[in-house]
Image (cartoon, helix red, strand yellow):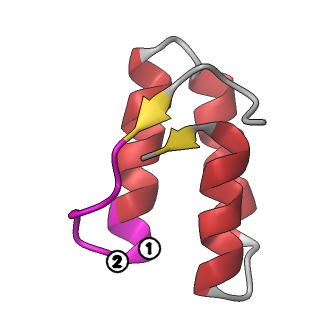
Amino acid sequence: MPKTDVTVKLVGENGNVFNLGAIVSRALERAGYKEEAKQMQADVMACESYDEALMVFMNYVEVE
């Protein structure tokens, strides 16, 4: 279960991990989760693979 109640649609978006991170970060910030957005970005930068980064996104938001 994600840390927030934010839902983000990533299907059909440019799959570049930086683009996806920006989409998730903006959604978190718009919903008032500014600190979570910063932490999510730090967590993604520490990832060693694309799949690991996707899991980080799913830890913070519900992905559609």
| Residue 52 on the magenta span | no
Image spot of residue 25 (x, y percent): 46, 41
Name the amino acid, label 1. Answer: Val
Residue at which label 2 appears: 16
In contact (CB < 8 Å): disc 2 and disc 1: yes
The total number of labels drawn is 2
Instruction: Determine whether the residue tagged by mark 1 lies in a helix, strand or loop.
Output: helix
Main secondary-structure element of the magenta-colored stretch: loop
Image quadrant of residue 24? Answer: top left
Please name whichever residue, 10 or 50, is drawn nearer the observer in this view of the structure: 10
Give above or below for 48 relative to 46: below
Rendered residue at 57%/23% (across/down)? 34
- In this image, 63 relative to 11: left or right? right
Name the amino acid, label 2. Answer: Asn
Image spot of residue 35 (x, y percent): 67, 26
Residue at which label 1 appears: 17
Give the magenta part as a residue range. Answer: 9-19
Image spot of residue 51 (x, y percent): 64, 80
List the single residue furthest toward the top. Answer: 32
- In this image, 12 relative to 37: left or right? left
CA distance for labels 2 and 1: 4 Å
Please name whichever residue, 46 or 11, is drawn nearer the observer in this view of the structure: 11
Please name whichever residue, 15 or 40, is drawn nearer the observer in this view of the structure: 15
Rendered residue at 46%/57% (across/down)? 21
**The N terminus - image quarter:** top right
Rendered residue at 67%/88% (across/down)? 49
